[in-house]
Amino acid sequence: MPEGWNWRDDAASGFEDEYDHYLKSAAAKLRGGAPEAEVVNYLAHVEIDIMGLGERQNTLVRAKAVVQAILADDLM
């Protein structure tokens, strides 16, 4: 998504894909009080097992970064 766009903007709707519900689920888990580590593991599971991409050296690092981004975003 181009810089300055918000994921809620109508113009950003074309960037949605079939995996967005995993991100929304992760955000809901965090907002519901789930521990960060649980959500990191959930996101890693999605990438490794559900998407079938396998585990990479930086899988958990990237999952942690996503969790931190969700927590930093008041709109999510």
Image (spheres, rainbow, N blue to C red):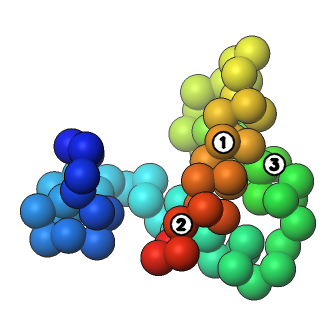
Q: Residues within 10 Å of mark 1 (few under 14, many from 20)?
A: few
- Pointers 1 and 3 in contact (CB under 8 A)? no
Using the numbered discs, state the Cα–Cα distance from disc 1 to disc 2 in whole angstroms.
12 Å
Residue 49 shows in the view = no
**Residue 40 at x, y = what percent?**
77, 49
Disc number at residue 73? 2
Residue at disc 1, secondary structure: helix
In the image, 12 versus 47, the foreground residue is 12
Label whose residue precedes the other's in the sequence (1 or 2): 1
Using the numbered discs, state the Cα–Cα distance from disc 2 to disc 3 in whole angstroms.
20 Å
Label whose residue precedes the other's in the sequence (2 or 3): 3
Which residue position is annotated with label 1? Answer: 65
Note whether 45 is above or below 69 in the view shown.
above
Residue found 54% across the figure and 60% down from its top: 23
Which marked residue is nearer to the observer: mark 1 or mark 3? 1
Q: Residues within 10 Å of mark 2 (few under 14, many from 20)?
A: few
- Residue placed furthest toward the top: 57
Q: Quadrant of residue 5?
A: bottom left
Using the numbered discs, state the Cα–Cα distance from disc 1 to disc 3 in whole angstroms.
12 Å
- Residue placed furthest toward the bottom: 32
> Of the residues shown, which amino acid type is indicated by label 1?
Ala
**Residue 24 at x, y = what percent?**
52, 69
Note whether 64 is above or below 12 in the view shown.
above
Which residue position is annotated with label 3? Answer: 41
Residue at disc 2, secondary structure: loop
